[in-house]
Image (cartoon, rainbow, N blue to C red):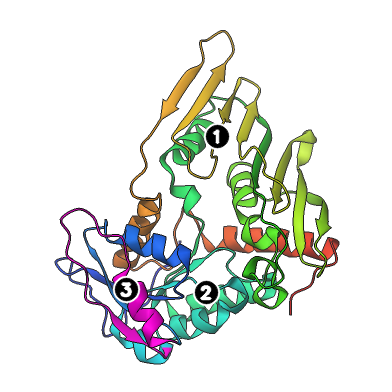
Amino acid sequence: MAMNRGLPATFSADLEHPLRWGVIGTGSIAHTVMSDLLLVPDAEMVAVCSRSADRGAAFAGGLDLPRGARRPTVAVFERLADMLPEIDVLYVATPHGVHHEAVIPALESGTAVLAEKALTVHYRQAQTMVDAARSNGAFLMEAIWTRFNPLHVRLRELVAQGVLGEIRSVSDDFSFRFPYDPGHRLYDPALGGGGLLDLGPYPVSFIQSLLGDPDSVDVAGSLAANRVDDSATLMFRYADGITGVGTCSMRAEGPNTACVVGTLGRVEIEANALRPTRMTLYRDDLEPEELTTSIEGSGYVPQLREVQSRVRAGDIESPVMPHRDSLSIMRILTGALSALGVHHP
């Protein structure tokens, strides 16, 4: 794993001092993730960047506080350039169609970046971001928080230990019904709207984390009235007939389940595959085994701890969600969008 060649002069390297976080974007995901940040002891939210000072102040004042905690003092900036010298880590929670406008200058300043998924809207732009992280020695990670869920971690361990034998198929679904609304960001092509970029990173990441990069990917899907993709099924093909199937949709509520099948057994996540608290291990001639976990906050705390750990260590990427995986995911999504006739500038 690549390492940071040097930390910015303002970096809070002293372990006795919390890392200073800033956020750009004040939507619901920013609220949820930054509220979870308040559960991380060595992290401190100190700044928010918003084009509206009133909206930024309202965002900071509306965070969900842990019991007994004091509300953090948060500075509001209208310009990202003014905020960057005051923080160690930037969380980018703007629509992915404009991620690059914040990610690139942050990395060039030496500021660590956690950027929401999808990292951006096409592979070429993702490669530019990774290049910026490497050339500036700055940490960059795509916020696919599901990789840090304790049961997802345990599942990868079971696969690596050979408990399921040779993995033959992996399936994952993330689908919900969101009626067509051309004014909403999910359906706004200028903001990178569409199911594949908003929902697709989760099933694609899940399959890729277990099977690696596919030999080929086939896609079938549908487009909304404004030509934004609203549903897709991706078939991942590997050597010896191994397959992965990922589905995402904004047209219909799906089962939101996942299944990993091997020659010696299988694991089923039977509900809420994004944030599971229970999964079942089935093995030949053995009773089914239920594996359970609890969720810290809204589920983002393990991801935030990973960022904290890697930034303090001077790393520029996480081994759990490395740059190469983000690039692989974006390559798959870009190809699927192209096959459906969707092209982002």
| Secondary element at image label 1 | loop
- In the picture, measured across the screen, residue 151 lies left or right of residue 119, that is left
Residue 187, horizontal then vertical, whole percent: 70, 67
Please report the residue visible at 40 percent of the width from the left and 80 percent of the height from the top: 55
Residue 132, horizontal then vertical, whole percent: 52, 80
Q: Quadrant of residue 48?
A: bottom left
Q: Kindly check if marks 3 and 2 are in contact, taking CB atoms under 8 A apart as contact.
A: no
Label 1: which residue? 271
* Span highlighted in magenta in the image: 52-79
Crowding near the residue tagged with mark 1, few <14, some 14–19, many ≥20 C-alpha atoms within 10 Å: some
Going from N to C along the chain, the mark reached first, 3 or 2, is 3
Label 2: which residue? 94
Q: Is residue 152 above or below residue 34?
A: above
- Which circle, 3 or 2, is nearer the viewer? 3
* Number of numbered labels in the structure image: 3
Q: Quadrant of residue 256?
A: top right
Look at the image and tell me whether residue 116 can be seen: yes
The quadrant of the image that shows the C terminus is bottom right
Going from N to C along the chain, the mark reached first, 3 or 1, is 3
Residue 189, horizontal then vertical, whole percent: 72, 74
The quadrant of the image that shows the N terminus is bottom left
| Secondary element at image label 2 | loop
Label 3: which residue? 60
Please report the residue visible at 77 percent of the width from the left and 61 percent of the height from the top: 229
Q: Is residue 235 above or below residue 128?
A: above
Q: Quadrant of residue 6?
A: bottom left
